[in-house]
Image (cartoon, rainbow, N blue to C red):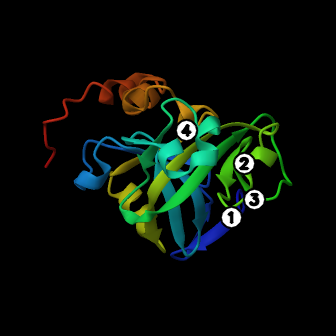
Amino acid sequence: MQGEGQAIGGRTTESMTGKLLVATPALKDPNFDRTVVLLVAHEPGGALGVVLNRATEVAVADVLRDWGDLARHPAVLFEGGPVQPDSAICLARMRQPVRRLKGFHQVSGAVGTLDLSVDPHRLRENVQSIRVFAGYAGWGAGQVEQEIKEGSWFVLDALPGDAFVDRPDDLWPMVLRRQGGMMAAVAHFPPDVALN
């Protein structure tokens, strides 16, 4: 449950649901090079998130015709991660924070996941925009915590618009720059330099 302490590996930790995992230059997995992942669930059994900055060229309307009008520019599918790439996760930004709306599961504030089996026409007055992700990033119990400890990820606060930026390719440096100080300097780290 979001915000509640959890026992992980014998210690209590806060849920990271709604946080951003921002790949550090030390992360070796090419699936996550320079990615920004929004954690949509973080529980003792593991974590699930979607990569926010990997747009495809496939239009949402080509795959999910009725949802195309609600998709934020660029209105394309995103590569949400390497797990189950044939499945879809929809993130929605509501016009105002909503606790009870059929098919909507709040992640943080006005942002949450939306069930794509719900009729999109019934949601138009409540939904500001959506983003659809093919696949997701998943971690088993304690795995994401270990990767953070090893220096693979920065854990940062998300802004409501992070999942819906018009220029997703710019999200990684943008999130780092807004942290200021040494973190902002990481945004300028050359992409072809490997850390040992």
Distance of mark 4 from mark 2, alpha carbons?
A: 19 Å
Image location of residue 39, percent across then percent down: 54, 53
Mark 1: secondary structure: strand
Q: Which residue is mark 3?
A: 103
Judged by depth in the image, the label closer to the viewer, 1 or 2, is 2
Q: How far apart are labels 3 and 2 at the CA level?
A: 10 Å
> Relative to 51, is 131 on the left or the right?
right
Q: Do the CB atoms of the residues marked 3 and 4 lie less than 8 Å apart? A: no
Residue drawn at 45 percent across, 56 percent down: 134
Give the amino acid at mark 3.
Gly
Lower sequence index among marks 1 and 2: 1
Neighbourhood count class around disc 4 (C-alpha, 10 Å): few under 14, some 14–19, many 20 upward: many
The one of 168 and 191 positioned closer to us in this rendering = 168
Q: Which mark identifies residue 120?
A: 2
Mark 4 vs mark 1, CA separation in Å: 25 Å
Q: Which of the two labelled residues, at mark 1 and mark 3, occupies the earlier sequence position?
A: 1
